[in-house]
Image (cartoon, grey):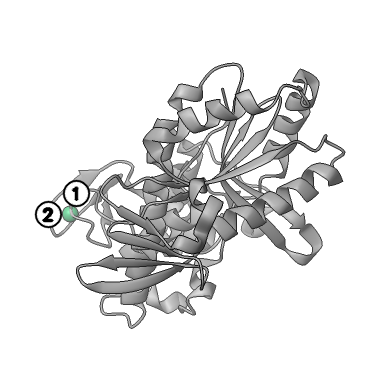
Amino acid sequence: MIRKARSKPIKLLKLEVLLERMVPNHTKKQQIVGDFVKVNAGFKGEMSLDFHLTDLLNDHYDIFQDLRLPRDKNKDLFFQIDSLIVHSRFCVLLEVKNLIGNLYFDHQFDQIIRTRDGVDETFPDPINQVELQAKYFAEWLAAHKLPSVPLYTLVVITNQKSYIRTSSKYGKKAQKIIRGNNLAKKINNYEKLHEEALLLNKERNKLSSLLNKQHTPHNPDILKSYHINTGDILTGVSCPSCNTIPMVRIKRNWFCKHCSTKSMNAHVKALQDYALLFDPIAKNKDIREFLHIESRSSAKKLLSAMNLTPTGLRKSATYTLPIPK
Ligand SMILES: [Zn+2]
């Protein structure tokens, strides 16, 4: 069964909002669009992998999707696993690649060369990546006094149209590259290779609660990572129909001057945007500036209608804004 489900990565949510709210013609725009396309393709690939895991949805397997675990919290070192499959006799780590085009796994230089529309692009060898994650995971298990179990690693190519070739020197390693539709069969075959149950129910439960507890989503400060100034971000409520920013507040409604859309709750999205771009903790004054509301009490009413209550005293009181799931 699924013990940890996948949700949209925070980084992806942040990139989406950044693109919606950057001033037009910003010099960083192309770079950010490129990164958004990459992160989005990765997420879509992982979602399509989940479809191939449905055949393993039974009591024999615990499935953990998208883990980011500490190697050393003090040094801010983490390792990531796209999907982890736990069986009482072994575990499987999956690395997902959602690449369109012709893929050539080049053993000599530890890379994939992707050719698409006549253009070559290189990516780091995903087999090396997933093997490194398995090494970190083995250390993590030992550090938490869990039994050491056989760890298998696989690279799953989720795009059915991609044409895969490997260099002749790859040898046995080439068997680790598989397509999504062969995944369940491959994993079921591992059952035949092992007889001894190393993770009993008690250990599997311990492992599950530890993994969920230690999972630390990657949550970058997006403005800082692209060196974008606060002044380059458009403030105001965006129109749910045409995305124009800002809407104006007229008689308890948000009104779009561009397409005449009226909305009662368009500010909810704006507050989520604020939380993603700046800080989920905000004062009434910050919120008013961002929503373009002058009255302190109207802002207060909007927030309390969202069941948000202030912490702290008067003007220094803060609200914890919701981040979309
Ligand atoms: Zn509009």
Which of discs 2 and 1 lies nearer the camera? The answer is 1
Which secondary structure lies at badge 2? loop
Report which quarter residue 16 is drawn in. Answer: bottom left
Placement of the N terminus among the 4 image quadrants: top right
Is ligand 1 less than 8 Å from the beta carbon at label 1?
Answer: yes
Q: Residue 115 in the image: x percent, y percent?
A: 28, 67
Residue sitting at 51 percent across and 73 percent down?
A: 109
Q: Which residue is mark 1?
A: 241
First-in-chain label (2 vs 1): 1
Is ligand 1 less than 8 Å from the beta carbon at label 2?
Answer: yes
Q: Which residue is mark 2?
A: 259
Q: Which residue is situated farthest in the bottom direction here?
A: 27
Q: Which mark is residue 38?
A: none
Q: Nearer the viewer, residue 92 or 50?
A: 92
In this rendering, position of residue 84 left or right of residue 238:
right
Q: Residue 261 in the image: x percent, y percent?
A: 17, 48
In this rendering, position of residue 283 left or right of residue 301:
right
Residue sitting at 79 percent across and 50 percent down?
A: 139
Q: Residue 234 in the image: x percent, y percent?
A: 35, 69
Q: Are marks 2 and 1 in contact (CB under 8 Å)?
A: yes
Amino acid at pointer 1: Ser
Q: Residue 50 in the image: x percent, y percent?
A: 44, 35
Q: Nearer the viewer, residue 70 or 322?
A: 70
Report which quarter residue 132 is drawn in. Answer: bottom right
- The residue carrying pointer 1 sits among few (fewer than 14), some (14 to 19) or many (20 or more) residues within 10 Å by Cα, namely few
